[in-house]
Image (spheres, rainbow, N blue to C red):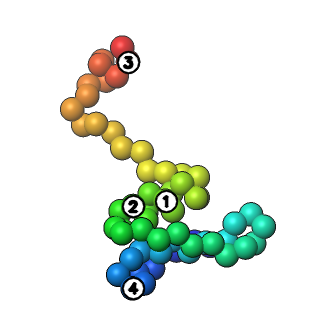
Amino acid sequence: MACIRKRRGKYVVDYRDNLGKRRWITHDTRKDAEKELGKILGREKRTVDGKVTVKERAA
């Protein structure tokens, strides 16, 4: 299981890798930490541009 914690003014992504070894990565912002957590979990958030129409997207 992975989590994000705030420690000493930084956001820490704390998780265990495939071999069970504990890893952690620090980031300055929570947003960056959440992106990193998404990469680790393999399900990074995808955003949709609200200004693009279906017709433009299909082209």
Crowd rating for badge 2 (residues with CA inside 10 Å; few <14, some 14–19, many 20+): some
Q: Are marks 1 and 2 in contact (CB under 8 Å)?
A: yes
Quarter holding the C terminus? top left
Which residue reaches farthest top? 59
How many circles with numbers are drawn on the protein? 4
Question: Where does label 3 land, which residue?
Answer: 58
* Label 2 vs 4, first from the N-terminus: 4
Residue found at x 39% / y 85%: 8
Q: Nearer the viewer, mark 4 or mark 1?
A: 4
Q: Nearer the viewer, mark 2 or mark 4?
A: 4
What amino acid is at disc 3? Ala
Question: Where does label 1 land, which residue?
Answer: 36
Out of 29 and 52, give the one closest to the viewer.
29
Query: Whole-Å distance between the Cαs marked 2 and 4?
Result: 16 Å
The numbered disc on residue 8 is 4
Q: Please tell me whether mark 2 sits on a helix, a strand or a loop.
A: helix
Query: Whole-Å distance between the Cαs marked 4 and 1?
Result: 19 Å
